[in-house]
Image (cartoon, rainbow, N blue to C red):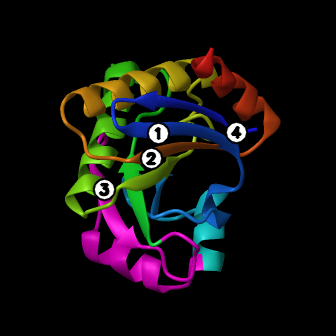
Amino acid sequence: MPEMKKIRNCELRLIRQDITDFEIEAFVFYARPDLELGSGFGSAITRRGGPVIKKELDAVGSLSITEAAVTGAGQLKAEYIVHAVGPVFQEERTEEKLHATVLNALKKAEAKGIRRIAFPPMGTGFYGVPLAASRDIMIRAFEAYLSQGGKMEEIVICANDLREYRAFQGMFH
């Protein structure tokens, strides 16, 4: 049974699935400032989505930390990818920057007309943000966004494995 709660008019859900193989309007990718797709989920996006995504990213160029850009998702099941550049754990003001990154990803998606979006545990892979910190910051950012009139109808946290899933389960209790 999926974990779920309502925040204002938005349904917040937790699932365990590969975000690059999830059918949703858009998903967030924790991007590098140079917007190169690299390894891990980046290589899955390249392999499954096709070259059109890289072409769109090349047109954007680069982003600063906390900024986001929306591209199409090529041949993936999602329609869009929100490339959000977040901080590396323990850099100056990590929590503040991660909060801003999540908010900016939501705002960019909303500006594109997106109403259903999936997030990975932000920054917890290569960038080293602890799962509990990521969870708490993400939930605070979702609540702040929605309390300020954000129009998302569904936000899905897409845990890749049981360790990530269990860390986020706590937000529903």
Per the rendering, the mark at residue 11 is: 1
Marks 4 and 1, how far apart at CA: 12 Å
Q: Which residue is mark 3?
A: 109
Q: Choose between 91 and 81: the one closer to the eye.
A: 81
Cα–Cα gap, marks 4 and 3:
24 Å
Callout 2–callout 1 Cβ contact below 8 Å: yes
Position above or below: 134 against 43? above
Residue position marked by numbered label 2 in the rendering: 154
Q: Disc 2 to disc 3, how far (Cα)?
A: 12 Å
- Amino acid residing under circle 1: Glu
Q: Earlier in the sequence, mark 4 or mark 1?
A: 4
Up the image or down, 156 lies above or below 165; here it is: below
User: Please, what secondary structure does the residue beneath circle 2 have?
Assistant: strand
Nearest to the eye among marks 3 and 1: give it.
Answer: 1
Q: Amino acid at mark 3?
A: Ala
Tell me which segment is drawn in magenta. 49-78
Instruction: Label 3: state its secondary structure.
Output: helix
